[in-house]
Image (cartoon, grey):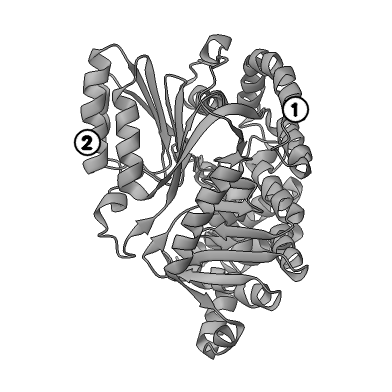
Amino acid sequence: MNLDWLTFSAATHIILASSSLYILIKDGSKPVRIWAWILLIVFLPIVGALLYFSFGVNLRRRKLFDLKKEIDYVQFETFVQKYSQEAEVELLKRHDVAPKYLHLIRLLTKVNSSIITFNNKVQILNDGPDTFQSIFRACEGAKSYIHLQYYIFIDGILADKFLEIFINKIKEGVAVRIIYDAVGSWELSRDLIARYQEIGVEIIPFMPVRFGRLARLNYRNHRKILVIDGEIGFTGGINIDDKYILDNDALGHWSDTHLKIEGMGVNFLHFVFLSDWLFVSKENLIKPSMFRILDPVGDTPLQIVSSGPDADYPNILQQYLYILYQAKKYVYIVNPYLVPDSNLSMAIKTVALSGIDVRIIVPSKSESPIIHYTIQSYFSRFLNAGVKIYLYNGGFIHSKVILSDDAICSIGTANLDIRSFEQNFEINALIYDEDTTLTMKEQYYTFQADSSLLTLKEHAARSNSERIKEKLSRLSSPLM
C-alpha cells in the first residue's frame, strides 16, 4: 500500500511538474521568474506545480482575453476617431501642458486608446468618510444609470447604504450594474447579493474561480470605478469596506486617496467599466451612444490609463517609468506595496542618484509578515542611492499616488509591484495640471508629517534575524 502510494505520488509529481515546466518555458516569462517557479515546482512536489497553475500561468499570451480586446476597441473606435483630432489640436495649443510630457500623452494614446481630455473638473478625496459622502451624493442624483466596479465589495454599513440608495433609484428607472472581483470580495455574502438582485441590481463577479480554472485565481480585477450617467466618475484606492469609516482594523486608521472626475475624461473611465461588463456579462453596452462630447465643466487635462493581461504593453509601468525619467526637481510616491520589478527599481535608483529628490512613503506595518519583509528588502539599495523612505505611522496608508515637478500627478489603483504591472486589471487617472498636483503635494506633506524618515544608519542597525527574514521573503517577489 505504501509503495503504491509512493508510486502514485511520484507519477503525479512528474506529470504536474512536466506540464507546468513546459507551459512556463513556452510562455516566455522573465528568466528570474522562470527560475523562481522551477525551484518551487522541484522542491515542493505536487504543491509547487499546483501553486504555479493557480498563480503563475501567463494568460497574457493566451486566448482568454483576445475576444474581449477585439470587441472593446472596434466598438470604441468611432468615438475615439471623432474626438482624437480635436484633442490633438487642443494639445498643441495648450502651453500649460509641459512639452516634456507630450510624448507620454501620445504613447498612452497609442498603446491605451485613451485620448487626453481638457475640460475636466477634478476633486481629490482623502480617506473614507469624505469619499463616500461624495459618492453617495452623486449616486442620489443619478438619472439614467449607476455603474460600479470594485475589487473589494463586502457586507457592512457602506454596502447597506448603497442598497438603500439603489432601492430608490431603481424605482425612478435608474439602471444599476455592479462588478465585484470574485477573490477580492470573497467575504461578500450570498444574502447581500440576493438582496441586491431582488431590487433589480445586475451584480456579477469578475472571473470566479472554479475547479479546472485555477489559473484565473492569479488574474484579478483590482480596479475601483464608479460612473453616474456618463458625467461623473470616481476612481482611486478606496474599496467598499467598512474599515475605511470605522477605524477598527488591526492596522489602525486606513488612509487612502480617491478622485472625483467630471467632464470628458469620464468617457474613458466609463469605457473601461463597459469593457469589463462585456467580459463578465456578455452584454455589449459599448456603443457610440454611450459616449458624448460633454460641455466644459473645468479646465483640467487628464488621461485615463488602464492596464491588464488583455493589454499588449504594461501601460501603467510605462507611465511610472516615464514620469521618473522626465523628472527635473522631484518625484514623490505614496504606495503600500513597494515590490518593483528590475526596470522600476533601476529607474528609482537612477533618478535619485542623478540628484532628483525622490521620496517614497510606505506603511510602517503591512498586512502580512511576508509583504512587510519583502518591501523592507528593497530599502538598502534605495537608501544607498539617496531615495528618502518614510514609514507611515498614522495607521495603514493605502494610497497609490505619484507626482512630479508641480506638473503631473497620478491617482489610481496600481501598486508598485509585479502583480499590478502584469497580472491585475488596474486603472489610474493621470493629471497634467499644476493646481491639482500642488493640492496633492500638500496632502503628501500631511502624510509625511505622520511618518518617520528612515535613515541608512537606522536601517543598517537592524538585527541579523530581520535580514534573514528579508532575504527569505524577497525570494517570493518574482512570484508576486
Residue 241, x across and y down, in percent: 31, 46
Q: Along the polypeptide, which appears first: circle 2 or circle 1?
A: 1
Residue 63, x across and y down, in percent: 66, 31
Q: CA distance from mark 2 to mark 1?
A: 47 Å
* Secondary structure of the residue carrying numbered label 1: helix
* Secondary structure of the residue carrying numbered label 2: helix
Residue 335 drawn above or below residue 281:
below
Name the foreground residue: 385 vs 153. 385
Residue 198, x across and y down, in percent: 22, 22
218 lies left or right of 139: right
Residue at 61 percent of width and 32 percent of height: 64
Name the foreground residue: 394 vs 190. 394
| Amino acid type at mark 2 | Asp
Residue 13 drawn above or below residue 449:
above
Q: Is residue 319 visible?
A: yes
User: Callout 1: few (<14), some (14-19), or many (20+) C-alpha neighbours within 10 Å?
Assistant: few
Residue at 70 percent of width and 60 percent of height: 329
Q: Quadrant of residue 474?
A: bottom right
User: Callout 2: few (<14), some (14-19), or many (20+) C-alpha neighbours within 10 Å?
Assistant: some
156 lies left or right of 232: left
Residue at 76 percent of width and 33 percent of height: 106
Q: Where residue 93 is drawn, which disc sits there?
A: 1
Q: Quadrant of residue 199?
A: top left
Q: Is residue 199 visible?
A: no
> Badge 2 is on which residue?
160
Residue 22, x across and y down, in percent: 72, 50
